[in-house]
Every structure is written in structure tokens, then in C-alpha cells.
Image (cartoon, rainbow, N blue to C red):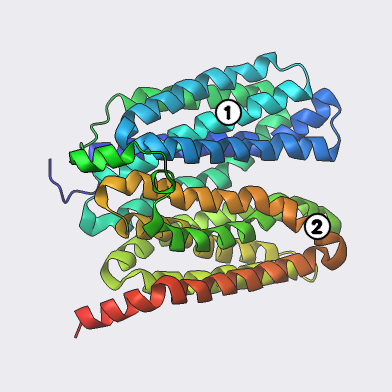
């Protein structure tokens, strides 16, 4: 196999599998609250819990699976996650009350999080080192494409068919992904006896990769900013009367991310991470502020979708690449897990905290505040990582 070939069989398979996993995530994430309300007469708080508790399951998986992914093997981790995902998906058919629904949701989140941890560790091994930014960039397209297509497909199914059709589609995606995974050949990492012995100890560094924490902390802030969109955009759109336009936000988000990704990945590898990340922070911050003004012009929501796609989509892919390149090779899986624990943590915990501010500052104020938060994240990036890499890039080109 050509070690410099990015588009290998292994890379294509892991990208497809990861896309299917994120489609499953977003297909149900945006429709489960409607199911809870219609099926069990849940109030908005109970429906919100059924939606958000899924992220708790994902976070638990990130921590537990991330701890063992490199020693257990990412391919085995993917198998385990996919098997649990298939089983848990069918459990939705036997849910008879809200308590059971919440239990299934958290287990489903754990199952999917385990599988995604496996794919994240696999791609870090199969992507050539000199094409890491480009490769992880394409791989990370799964998230925005899932976020754009999943809600669209899920809502269309819910409008024209029963919720059970969503479940069947999710089960099919999981089974097909499981079938594809049998054709994966994942390179083994060379681990010394000392490294293996150290990995079995119960300590902080075996659950989190310290070298990945600076970029992961920035991801926590960025994830919180993005959480304000996925959690409150629909409610904001209803309040200002632009629901139909708002339904296309994630589609524009996905398109802008997909179009920009080939350029962003190559620029990351050739020009360095600062070249792509500084504009990403600016685009995301401006996108959030423009969203805050959507009551003056509904099409602002679509413009915000484009800018958020350029900003958030670029950050997630580039941030993961930074976490991997800053960490030891034998801990690449743990580095990826650390990055996404913080990113998902912002998306999972953010809505609860942000909801406390809305009665006082409104949705307009919320999105302005999130724009400021992203700007602060950009400044922290410069202080914690950007200045160091900027000097290294200048030195290498003198």
C-alpha cells in the first residue's frame, strides 16, 4: 500500500462509516423531542431531557472508550460500538414511557460514542502524516454533513411517515456501517512495554491526553457557542416568524463546509494551522452576531449558516488534527477522544447554562454573547497555540 495515498480503501471506508454514524445521531437528535411529546405527552422540559441526555451517553463513551481505544484496538472498539448501536436502536420499538426512553437514549449515546471513538482513532492511523490536515478535514465532514442532512431527512420522514421509519433507517445505517468495517485494515502501533504498562495505570493521563488539552479547552468554548444554535435556533425562528427560512440553516451550513473543506485541509498542511484557524474564529463570531440580527432580515439566517459552516466546520477538523499532531503517536486515539470530550461537553452542557441567560438578554443578546465568546476563544488560541506555531512557521520558511 502506498503510504502517501490519502484516498485508500481504509480511508474511504472509515469516512463512510463515520458519516453514517453522524446521520444516525442527527436523525434522532432533532426528532426525538417530537416523539416524546406526541407519544408520551411530555412537556418541553421532559422532551428536552430526552434529547440532551443522549450527549451525556456520548461523553461517557468518549471518556471510557478513549481510555482503552489504543490498547483495546480501534477496530474492535468500532465493532463493539456498532453492535451496541444496532441493539439499542431496536430498543426504541419497545419503549413504553419517558423513563425507558431516557434510559435507551443514554445507552444509545454511549453506543454511538463508542463507535465514533473507534473511527476517530482509525483515521488517525490510516491518514499519511504529511496529509493529516487534509485527511482529517475530509473525515470530519461527517459532522456537518450529518448535521445538515440528518435533521432534513428526519423531519421529512416525521412529516410523511411514522417515527418508526426513522428508527428503521437508523438501524439500516448501523448495519451497513458494521458490514463495511469488516473490510478495514488498521495498522498496528508499535508500543513499548513501558508504554503498555503505563497505559494500564488508573490516572488522569490515561483518560485525557495532556498535550491535547489546550486545543480541547478552546473547543469547549467553541462548542458552547455552537450549542446556542442547535439548541435554540428553532425557538428563536418561531419567535421572530422565520421558521421556513431557518429550516435551511443547516443545509447552507453543510454546503459551505463541504465546499471549503478541500481547500482548508490543503492549506492546513502547506501553510499551517494559523492560516486556516484565525479566519475560522472570525467567520464563526461574525456568523453568530449576524444571526442575532435575523429579525431585521430573515435571509441573515442563511448568511449566518454559511459563515458558521466556514468557522465551526473548519475548527472541528483543524482542532482534531492539532490534537493528534501535538500528541505522541501511540496516544493518537486518546488525543482525538480528549478533543471531542471537551467539544461535546460544550455542546451538551452549554444549553443548560445558556438557557439561564435567555430570560434576561433574549435570543438576540445570547447570540451576540456567543459571538464574543468565540472571539475570546480565538484570542486564547493565539496565546496557547497560535504564537508558538506562527514562530515555527516563519522560522521554517526563512
Instruction: Determine whether 332 is above or below 281 in the image.
Output: above
Residue 374 drawn at (x, y percent) = 59, 69
Residue 289 placed where, x, y %?
68, 72
Badge 1 marks a residue whose secondary structure is: helix
Instruction: Name the one closer to the observer, 168 or 50.
Output: 50
The residue that label 1 is drawn on is 108
Residue 368 locus on image (x, y percent)? 71, 71
Please give the name of the residue rendered at 48% of the width and 40% of the height, measured from the top-left corner: 62
Q: Are marks 2 and 1 in contact (CB under 8 Å)?
A: no
Q: Which residue is mark 2?
A: 356
Q: Nearer the viewer, residue 219 or 271?
A: 219
Q: CA distance from mark 2 to mark 1?
A: 28 Å
Q: Position of residue 30 (x, y in %)?
A: 67, 39
Q: Quadrant of residue 236?
A: bottom right
Q: Determine the residue positioned at 26% across, 44% down.
A: 125
**Numbered circle sitting on residue 336:** none
Amino acid at each position: 500500500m502506498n503510504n502517501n495515498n490519502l484516498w485508500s480503501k481504509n480511508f474511504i471506508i472509515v469516512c463512510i462509516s463515520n458519516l453514517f454514524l453522524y446521520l444516525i445521531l442527527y436523525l434522532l437528535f432533532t426528532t426525538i423531542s417530537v416523539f416524546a411529546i406526541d407519544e408520551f405527552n411530555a412537556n418541553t422540559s421532559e422532551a428536552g431531557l430526552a434529547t440532551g441526555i443522549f450527549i451525556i451517553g456520548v461523553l461517557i463513551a468518549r471518556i471510557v472508550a478513549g481510555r482503552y481505544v489504543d490498547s483495546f484496538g480501534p477496530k474492535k472498539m468500532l465493532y463493539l460500538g456498532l453492535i451496541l448501536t444496532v441493539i439499542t436502536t431496536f430498543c426504541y420499538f419497545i419503549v413504553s414511557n419517558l423513563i425507558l426512553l431516557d434510559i435507551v437514549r443514554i445507552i444509545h449515546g454511549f453506543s454511538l460514542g463508542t463507535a465514533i471513538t473507534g473511527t476517530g482513532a482509525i483515521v488517525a492511523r490510516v491518514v499519511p502524516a504529511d496529509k493529516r490536515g487534509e485527511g482529517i478535514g475530509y473525515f470530519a465532514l461527517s459532522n456537518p454533513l450529518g448535521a445538515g442532512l440528518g435533521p432534513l431527512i428526519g423531519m421529512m420522514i416525521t412529516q410523511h411517515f411514522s417515527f418508526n421509519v426513522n428508527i428503521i433507517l437508523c438501524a439500516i445505517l448501523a448495519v451497513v456501517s458494521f458490514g463495511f468495517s469488516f473490510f478495514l485494515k488498521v495498522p498496528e502501533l508499535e508500543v513499548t512495554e513501558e508504554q503498555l504498562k503505563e497505559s494500564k495505570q488508573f490516572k488522569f493521563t490515561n483518560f485525557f491526553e495532556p498535550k491535547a488539552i489546550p486545543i480541547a479547552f478552546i473547543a469547549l468554548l467553541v462548542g458552547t457557542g455552537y450549542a446556542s444554535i442547535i439548541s435554540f435556533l428553532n425557538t428563536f425562528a418561531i419567535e421572530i416568524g422565520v421558521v421556513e427560512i431557518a429550516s435551511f440553516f443547516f443545509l447552507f451550513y453543510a454546503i459551505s463546509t463541504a465546499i471549503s473543506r478541500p481547500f482548508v485541509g490543503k492549506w492546513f498542511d502547506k501553510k499551517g494551522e494559523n492560516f486556516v484557524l484565525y479566519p475560522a474564529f472570525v467567520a464563526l463570531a461574525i456568523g453568530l452576531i449576524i444571526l442575532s440580527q435575523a429579525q431585521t432580515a430573515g435571509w441573515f439566517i442563511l448568511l449566518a449558516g454559511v459563515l458558521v459552516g466556514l468557522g465551526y466546520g473548519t475548527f472541528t477538523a483543524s482542532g482534531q488534527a492539532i490534537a493528534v499532531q501535538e500528541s505522541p503517536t501511540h496516544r493518537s486515539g486518546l488525543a482525538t477522544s480528549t478533543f471531542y470530550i471537551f467539544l461535546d461537553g460544550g455542546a451538551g452542557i452549554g444549553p443548560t447554562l445558556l438557557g439561564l441567560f435567555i430570560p434576561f438578554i433574549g435570543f438576540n443578546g445570547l447570540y451576540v454573547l456567543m459571538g464574543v465568546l468565540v472571539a475570546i476563544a480565538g484570542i486564547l488560541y493565539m496565546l496557547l497555540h497560535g504564537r508558538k506555531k506562527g514562530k515555527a512557521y516563519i522560522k521554517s520558511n526563512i
